Image (cartoon, rainbow, N blue to C red):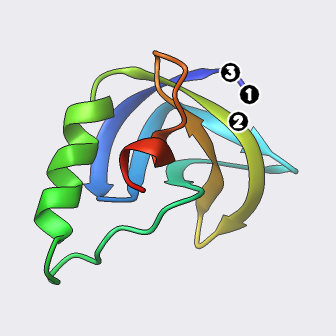
């Protein structure tokens, strides 16, 4: 997939991109990176994970790689930072 700009961090493992992604006849702006699971909002560690994700990618370009599925409107896919590293490397 192409490059996308991260425009909003929802939580430690969900964010919005611009422009919208398109995959298997579906499209949207919300992305859920594959390969790691962050604490849910309201639980221990959630704020730290959200801040970390924000510092890594908010306002920056990311490449969306292999897509696995669409889950609740979020494209679950491999996400690569502008330096080429898979985003999950920063959370595992």
The picture places residue 42, in percent across and down from the top left corner, at 14, 82
Q: Which residue is mark 3?
A: 2
Q: Quadrant of residue 79?
A: top right
Q: Tell me what residue is drawn at x 21 percent, y 76 percent.
A: 41
Q: Are marks 2 and 1 in contact (CB under 8 Å)?
A: yes
Q: In terms of depth relative to the viewer, which is nearer, 24 or 38?
A: 38
Q: Tell me what residue is drawn at x 29 percent, y 42 percent.
A: 8
Q: In terms of depth relative to the viewer, which is nearer, 63 or 21?
A: 63
User: Which quadrant holds the C terminus?
Assistant: bottom left
Q: Quadrant of residue 69?
A: bottom right
Disc 3 residue crowd, few under 14, some 14–19, many 20+, Cα 10 Å: few
Q: Tell me what residue is drawn at x 29 percent, y 74 percent.
A: 39
**Would you say 56 lies left or right of 74 here?**
left
Pick whichever of labels 2 and 1 is earlier in the sequence. 1
Q: Are marks 1 and 3 in contact (CB under 8 Å)?
A: yes
The picture places residue 60, in percent across and down from the top left corner, at 35, 21
Q: Which residue is mark 2?
A: 65
Q: Element at badge 3?
A: loop
Q: Element at badge 1?
A: loop
**Would you say 43 lies left or right of 11 here?**
left
Q: Tell me what residue is drawn at x 13 percent, y 59 percent.
A: 48
User: Which quadrant holds the N terminus?
Assistant: top right
Point out which mark residue 68 bears.
none
The picture places residue 57, in percent across and down from the top left corner, at 33, 31
Q: Element at badge 2?
A: strand
Q: CA distance from mark 1 to mark 3?
A: 4 Å
Q: Which residue is mark 1?
A: 1
Q: CA distance from mark 2 to mark 3?
A: 8 Å
Q: In terms of depth relative to the viewer, which is nearer, 86 or 63?
A: 86
Q: Quadrant of residue 66?
A: top right
């Amino acid at each position: 997939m192409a490059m996308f700009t991260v425009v909003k961090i929802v939580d430690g493992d969900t964010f919005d991109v611009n422009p919208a992604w398109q995959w298997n006849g579906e499209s949207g702006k919300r992305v859920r990176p594959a390969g790691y699971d962050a604490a849910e909002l309201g639980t221990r560690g959630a704020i730290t994970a959200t801040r970390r994700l924000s510092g890594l990618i908010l306002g920056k370009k990311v490449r969306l790689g292999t897509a696995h599925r669409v889950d609740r409107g979020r494209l679950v896919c491999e996400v690569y930072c502008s330096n080429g590293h898979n985003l999950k490397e920063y959370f595992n």
